[in-house]
Amino acid sequence: MRMTELIHKKREGGALSAEELHFLIENYTNGTIPDYQMSAFAMAVYFRGMTEEETVILTQEMMQSGDTVDLSLFGKLSADKHSTGGVGDKTTLIVAPIVATLGGKVAKMSGRGLGHTGGTVDKLESIPGFRTELSPEDFLRQVQEVGVAVIGQTGNLTPADKKLYALRDVTDTVDSLPLIASSIMSKKLAAGSQNIVLDVKVGSGAFLTKEEDARALAEQMVSIGKACGRNIRALLTNMDIPLGQNIGNALEVMEAVNVLRGRGCEDLTEVCVALATQLVSLVQNIPAQEAKTMVEDCIHSGKAFETMKKWVSAQGGNAQALEDFTLLPQASCTVEVLAPHSGYLTAMDTRMVGEASVFLGAGRSKKDDPIDYGAGIVLQKKTGDYAEKGECLAVLYCNDSAFVPNAQRRFLEAITWGDTPNAKSPLIFGIVG
Ligand code: URA
């Protein structure tokens, strides 16, 4: 088999066979197929697409290109969630202990923040002592005993995707639906959970801004998961507005605790309840309505918060910091952003709000940049609210006041003003699966 033939076949709109896809991924991973040929292939896929069958096989080949996690020990109870990324998205910190309290075994690998979006691993590491590297044995033992463990990506998981994703990034072939779906799902399948809920974000803070694109991606990922024998659903959720009020690592931990103590803001609580409901419904094989009641009870009884404390302690974190926020990293400098005039906030460019938070030190511009765990933004007004001139729109938190002017400018640029409020958009656009 020759790579030039595969490129030609795809360029002409043909569908690759299972043998051809196996050849492609095996030889790209081991370096026999060079990047320049794979780039041509990715561009052909970008223009010609892939059939559903090809996408499933490509995903399986990428999943099998490296290590896979064996969670068979947990039978049908293993559970995972995945978010396509957003601003203020601390849902894993809330959903994981809820699902664990209700019998799920949450064995999760998460990522770090990059660009304007945050990452769960960074948020967890803002808790003093929290370790996101565990040996495979400790990881499984903790899931068995506590019901939840969340670590950074370890081992040699999906090396084919790692290589191909980096290549797509520099050849403008990222936004091809079959390539995105197979990339995300190869990692989820390799991580081993039987039950998976995907949170596909839509809007100015997400990497897909249009609902129809997000729905098409969700449908492809759900169909790949089902074809590979997993129980899977996807929620399409609104990222045209930051989720909750707090953006930044320690600030988001505080907000997650508030939700688990029944004092969280409405939008964040609603999205977390919806995600946890779907995951509990899959794990326990019960109707969503029944699962929702269990999820709400588990928050109100304080049981989910107790699980969060056990989880944090098990990974070396100071659980006392979840009761006493002064033990979390703090910012030495706080600055209020004031409304430059009166009016309604009719839109917030959520990517720009995320960027303002990165400017304060809460995120990274480059992969290895250090993070200031205490930095971030607490929103006082969001889309739909009215502000009088001089009223506080947000409080900026940082440890270097030199960062403030840029962050403040970017935050104010993010806001569109109007004389009347817009109709409220839904938080959840739909469920697929
Ligand atoms: N996230 C991924 O993991 N892969 C993609 O292709 C796009 C987003």
Image: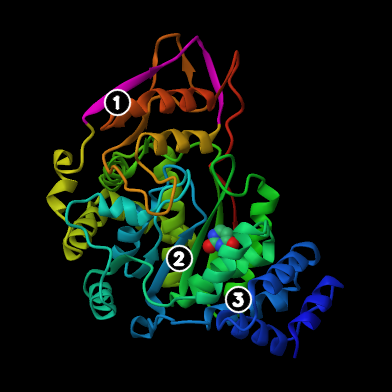
Mark 3: few/some/many CA within 10 Å (<14, 14-19, 20+): many
Magenta region:
332-348
Q: Label 3: which residue?
A: 59
Q: Where is residue 318 in the image (x, y as percent from the top left)?
A: 14, 54
- Which corner quadrant holds the C terminus? bottom right
Of residue 303 and residue 184, the one placed in the foreground of this image is: 184
Q: Position of residue 205 (x, y in %)?
A: 54, 41
Q: Mark 2 points at which residue?
A: 281
- Determine whether, in the image, residue 317 is placed left or right of residue 22: left
- The quarter of the picture where residue 423 lies is top right
| Quadrant of the rendered image holding ligand 1 | bottom right
Q: Is residue 340 magenta?
A: yes
SS state under label 3: helix
**For residue 357, what is the image quadrant?**
top left
Image quarter hosting the N terminus: bottom right
| Sequence-earlier tag: 1 or 2 | 2
The amino acid at mark 2 is: Ser
Query: Across the whole image, how many numbered discs are drawn on residues?
Result: 3
CA distance separating discs 3 and 1: 46 Å
Q: Along the line of sight, which residue is nearer the eye, 339 or 19?
A: 19
The amino acid on which the numbered mark 1 sits, given as a three-letter code, is Ser
Local crowd size for mark 1, using a 10 Å CA cut-off: few (<14), some (14–19), many (≥20):
some
Identified at 32% across, 66% down, the residue is 151
Q: Considering the numbered disc 1 on the image, is that residue within a helix, a strand or a loop?
A: helix
User: Which marked residue is nearer to the observer: mark 3 or mark 1?
Assistant: 1
Given this view, does label 3 or label 2 mark the residue nearer the observer?
A: 3
At x 49%, y 63%, the residue is 197
On the image, the x and y values in percent for residue 127 come to 22, 51
Name the amino acid type tagged 3: Thr
Q: Name the residue under label 1.
A: 401
Nearest the viewer among 326 and 298 is: 326
Q: Do the residues labelled 3 and 2 touch (CB within 8 Å)?
A: no
